[in-house]
Amino acid sequence: IPCLLAALLLTTAILTPFLAVLGYEAVYTHRIYAGVSVGDIDLGGLTLVEAEARLIEEFKNYADDLVRLRHGDRVWLVSAQESGLSYDARLSAMQAYRIGREQSVTGSLISQVRAMLHGHSIQPVRKFDEGSAVMYLSKLAEEVNRPERDARIFIDGSRDLTKPATTGYELDMPATLAAVRSRLATLPSEPIDVVIRELRLTIVNLETARIQ
């Protein structure tokens, strides 16, 4: 009897963890494992369809996040949506679902335990809508662009009056668009630098201008 009891206890000790793992895997079949989140959005226990639906709703709040554009001392605040930033709920849900489903069984179990005990947060999948960004930057260009003006001489009777030259500025659309696209991939906390080109002035020959 003692031997039988010992055998039963040993069998129970071996089978209990095994059965616990099987039960856990059964509960989370086709569901995201406990502790997995996208950003601060908990998706543990949800199916892919449920997770995508939840992310769609939650990502609506992200559309009003502000992105800062900067040139020198000037700063422009623009919503994430206007700047071309959006989030892919489906791909984000799929990446969350892959946590704990690595190729090896051991790796999968370790990831599941870590997620359950300590949590596992991943970044949302971001998308860049170039059309929205171009639309906003075009409006910004209307505010920034200023044509250059050469120095001019005006003859007022016997006096020559000089109008000083002014420097022109032009928003470099391709360079700024590239900077926005690159920086929005990581949702920067620091401002994104707007590229503004200084327009060169034509040197005016004063004698020629006087004759004109």
Image: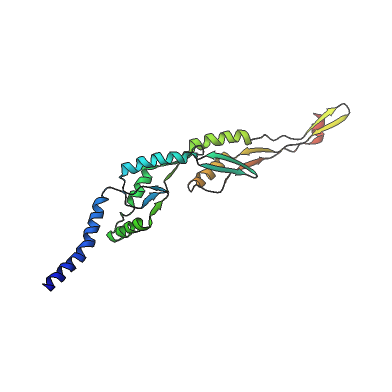
Pick the residue in front: 5 or 68. 5
For the rendered model, the colour scheme is rainbow
* Residue 106: percent from left, percent from top: 29, 61
Residue positioned 85% across, 27% down in the render: 156
The single residue placed furthest to the top in the displayed view is 157
Residue 194 visible in the displayed image? no
Q: How far across and how far down the image is residue 46, in percent?
A: 31, 46
Residue located 84% across and 28% down the image: 155
Residue 40 place in picture, x, y as percent: 42, 48
Number of numbered discs present? 0
Query: Residue at 38% across / 49% down in the picture?
Result: 37
Give percent across and percent down for residue 97.
33, 49
Locate the C terminus by quadrant.
top right
Residue 193 in which image quadrant:
top right
Question: Along the horizontal axis of the image, is 138 left or right of 10?
Answer: right
- Position above or below: 76 against 29: above
* Residue positioned most to the left: 1
- Residue with the most extreme right position: 158
Vertical comparison of 13 with 126: above or below: below
Question: Would you say residue 41 is visible in this rendering?
Answer: yes
Near-viewer residue (138 or 187): 187
Q: Residue furthest bottom?
A: 2
Q: Is residue 2 left or right of residue 205?
A: left
Closer to the camera, 119 or 109? 119
- Quadrant that contains the N terminus: bottom left
Query: In terms of image quadrants, where is residue 171?
Result: top right
| 182 with respect to 125 (left or right) | right
Foreground of the two, 139 or 108 = 108
